Amino acid sequence: MSQRPVLLFDSGIGGLTVLREARVLMPERRFVYVVDDAGFPYGSWGEDELTERIVGLFAKLIARYEPELCVIACNTASTLVLEHLRKAFAATPFVGTVPAIKPAAERTRSGLVSVLATPGTVKRAYTRDLIQSFAAQCHVRLVGSENLAGIAERYIRGDTIEPDEVLAEIAPCFVEQEAHKTDIVVLACTHYPFLANQFRSLAPWPVDWLDPAEAIAKRAQSLLAPVQAAWEEPDTAVFTSNEPDFAVKRLMSGFGLALAPMHH
Ligand code: DGL
């Protein structure tokens, strides 16, 4: 039985946090998980170069997989290229992942919210606009972490990570101002939920760590029609490098993903 897939895209393993939720909501669906590991990390790319790269990749991916819908499971990419992708591939619906600033502003009681993201996401006009539109009444601290996405990649591969290196990245999220303290940290990079337990145990005080994965999966589901017949084959993972290492291959098979080559 054929089924047009839902394509999920990230620069690394982060999008798996979204795939996990999407599978819970849509167990009958076929998924293709695309990792632009040859371009990782996205956080430090220039905006024009990154836009060109991702639009070019999608020209190939859409031609090859004819996805019913694409999920850009990456904040660094979504805040930049979502608009370009929608324009370039008007027949394909795209769901993006952008910092959960609106729900954070609705939930905070102290009015102090932090957004933990890559340096790219922190720089985006899109992120500033979200704050202006939805969190003008809050004090929002943007924390652009150079290293956390890489640390999450190492952690998921089974490498040791030092508590101090994680703490150094999250410490700027914790703000105290006139008897008020940060009470929500938005996880605005899909890699970070893999480190949520570390964050919790290292945090100087308890906060809500906001992970938007479920909301993104729900949004994707709301745009899809019910399937005729469940997909019973393994799902597919594609790496732009074509050379994931052993630990990553193991991880993919643990997620029920069979590797397929990326044709350049
Ligand atoms: N997972 C990506 C995000 O949500 C970024 C990781 C990276 O390439 O630095 O922003």
Image (cartoon, rainbow, N blue to C red):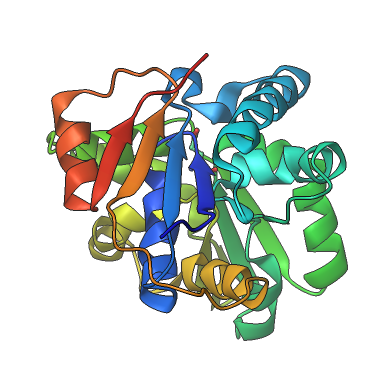
In the image, taking residue 78 as reference, residue 181 lies left or right, namely: left
Q: Is 162 rendered above or below residue 205?
A: above
> x and y percent of residue 17 in the render?
38, 57
In the image, taking residue 67 as reference, residue 1 lies left or right, namely: left
- 114 and 230: which is toward the camera: 230
- Which residue is the extreme one toward the top? 264
Q: Specify whether residue 196 is in view.
A: yes
- 88 and 234: which is toward the camera: 234
Q: Specify whether residue 191 is in view.
A: no
Q: Quadrant of the N terminus?
A: bottom left
The residue that appears at 71% across and 72% down in the rendered structure is: 102
Counting labels gives 0
The residue that appears at 36% across and 73% down in the rendered structure is: 27
Q: Is 249 rendered above or below residue 29?
A: above
The residue that appears at 66% across and 21% down in the rendered structure is: 53
In the image, taking residue 23 as reference, residue 100 lies left or right, namely: right
> x and y percent of residue 207 in the render?
42, 73
Quadrant location of residue 95?
bottom right
Q: Is 133 rendered above or below residue 94?
A: below
> x and y percent of residue 157 in the render?
18, 36
> x and y percent of residue 131 in the render?
78, 61
